[in-house]
Image (cartoon, rainbow, N blue to C red):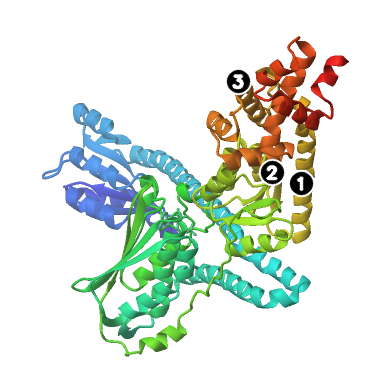
Amino acid sequence: MSQSDDATRILIVDDEPEIQPLYHLWFRKKVAAGIYKLHFALDGMTALEMIGRKPEIEIVLCDINMPNMNGLTLLPKLLELSNVLQVIMVSAYGDMPNIRQAMNLGAYDFLTKPINFEDLEKTIEKTQKIIHLAKRAKISKELEERNSNLLELDRLKTLFFTNISHEFRTPLTAILATAEQIKTAPNTWIEKGLPIIERNGHRLLDLINQVMELRRLESGKPVEIQLFRGDIIGFLHYLLESFQPQLEHKQIQLNIRGEVPELIIDFDPDKLTIILSNLISNAIKYTPAGGQVTVEITQQETALKLAVSDTGLGIPGADLAFVFDRFFRAATSSDEGGSGIGLSLTKELVELLNGEIGVESQEGSGSTFWVQLPISRQAEPIDIEQLKKAAPSVGPIQESVAFLGPNDERPRLLIVEDNIDIAQYLRSCLENEFFVHIAWNGQEGIEVAIESVPDMIISDVMMPVKNGYELCDTLKSNQTTSHIPIILLTAKSDEVSRLEGLEKGADAYLAKPFNRKELNIRVRKLLELRKNLQAHYSAIENHPSGPGEVRNEEDAFLWSVRKAVEEHIDQEHFGIVELCRSIGTSRTQLHRKIKALTNVSTSIYLRSIRMERAKKLLLETDLNVSEISYEVGFKDPRYFSSKFREHFGQRPSDLRRT
Ligand code: ADP
């Protein structure tokens, strides 16, 4: 048996049956020794059918002249069936035109009748060698392919581990940070902190469960479906309710549409919970604040259709086909945390329930994920209230957001962070020193920063809508906000991200999980730097007095103010309102920026520009004090003199005498 396994299998295709004994006779020893194994076919169709059945046949001896299908027609069909197979053509002596044609069609060699068997044996040996080479090439190509598949899988796994570690770090930071709070201030924190720990612990558990669930599905072991008969509509509404806190947190409106008030059918509550939760959390995650999520429930003839639509980022057309693949994450979502397993798990579960899932999406305007589940009514009935007790629910998220108010003297800190627990932890660490405002994504952060010019910003990097790098980039190149120190906060502690952050102008970097001490050190350092900046700009000599002296955004801002004031310096009524109009900022922006740089109020700063000009005129011209007073916008020379004295500690006439 093992001998014939190594045998070279030869198929002889010839319409003359009487030729067969000749082959048997000539090759009897080789056949007996298991070196050759001979097969015969009397026509082309039989030959093709045989090759189909016995792919181990490697050499075909094929007659050219046969009725029905001749050798020239058969040859290409044979070659198509296998890329290892070699064909040796057999024809009458002198049939050169047909033989040439066969060779051009891909025959390996030819013989002429009457067959010289000795010559045939040599031809077979030669053919065996070429077959051997072809097989080796095929194997190495297969290996190469397998290798590159493994590499791709490896790359996806690494990506998955990177993503999932980021996913883990945020809840872990919240838990560790809260534990620290409880340790330092047990009385105030024990009650506030426990729900945070609990919620984030659940989040971690959810993540792990998803990974395990996927493993289980992939292991091929049967997964149990537990169907109950009950009102699925009531259950869906109940599930949707549990997303209310997340929806409110992101100010997303949830619409529920569907004409079915009640529908008693079989469903698996656990699986349905995972399916719907994944679709809804994605819709919330990938939709900017203020958007809408719509769940549409329709009853079809034999199925129930659930469609979850959002007005969010959408998915690029090229990515659409891959969203249900494991570990896949669309380019548009790279700034959100995520592992790329939610949807693949959802799809596996939907298919397990004999349902279908699909997606339609337009990049930039939103996505619709739909699920269709077959309707059956055979399972045990169950009361929906019972299910509600068993189903996991999302704990309430308590929120307390302080908005900027006018009467607080503390420096203003803007926290830009989409995770409510981390945001609250930061606030609790810093609220004694700062008046804190929280923005929930990069875009909101940018808007608040430009509008209210805070004294410091702490921003997460991975956030919806706009990420921390974009925030840094925008604020650092805006004259109104360029001076604000920014601390970037991120789960990415690797060097590349750190460099990217610093390049975009971040003043410091803090990797999650961080502790209170580290945070305080960073904040203190930046406040010191800020004091140095103020010390520099509080001396008006250090302000640029011409466009040639502008070296950075701060200089540029101060120069634009000075230029505007100097252009109108003889106009008594050119005040703050006129200045704002002239340089295009709001009163608050102007005031905050000037105060941040020089530590004086806008009106004092304006006055000092006038006074500096007056001093210059006193020293460098022959104009008298009244003329100079008009020149710098004072109608009343006595008032001018008193203000001058207030400013420089000397009267204008004192300067003249020296
Ligand atoms: P994750 O959200 O953890 O990355 P999923 O498997 O749930 O993983 O989703 C895979 C990818 O599909 C996401 O990374 C995102 O790119 C895209 N995606 C899923 N849902 C939406 C949605 N509602 N809007 C836009 N993109 C989505």
Q: Write down the residue under mark 1.
A: 527
| Number of residues whose C-alpha sits closer than 10 Å to that of mark 2, classed few (under 14), some (14–19) or many (20 or more) | many
Where, by quadrant of the figure, is residue 252 drawn? bottom left
**Residue at (35% x, 69% y) in the render:** 350
SS class, disc 1: helix
* Position of residue 28 measured from the top left corner of the image (x, y, whole percent): 35, 53
| CB contact under 8 Å: marks 3 and 2 | no
Q: How many marks?
A: 3
SS class, disc 2: loop
Earlier in the chain: of badge 1 and badge 3, it is 1
For marks 2 and 1, give the CA distance.
8 Å
Earlier in the chain: of badge 2 and badge 1, it is 2
**Residue at (41% x, 50% y) in the render:** 313
**Residue at (28% x, 82% y) in the render:** 265
- Dividing the image into 4 quarters, which one contains the N terminus? bottom left
| CB contact under 8 Å: marks 2 and 1 | yes
Image position of 536 with respect to 62: above or below: above
Earlier in the chain: of badge 3 and badge 2, it is 2
Tell me the amino acid under the disc marked 3: Glu
Tell me the amino acid under the disc marked 2: Pro
Image position of 492 with respect to 641: above or below: below
Q: Write down the residue under mark 2.
A: 485
Image position of 611 with respect to 318: above or below: above
Where, by quadrant of the figure, is residue 306 drawn? bottom left
For marks 1 and 3, give the CA distance.
35 Å
Position of 105 compared to 344: left or right?
A: left
Q: Nearer the viewer, residue 208 or 548?
A: 548
**Residue 58 appears in the figure:** yes
Where, by quadrant of the figure, is residue 593 drawn? top right
Q: Write down the residue under mark 3.
A: 567
For marks 3 and 2, give the CA distance.
32 Å
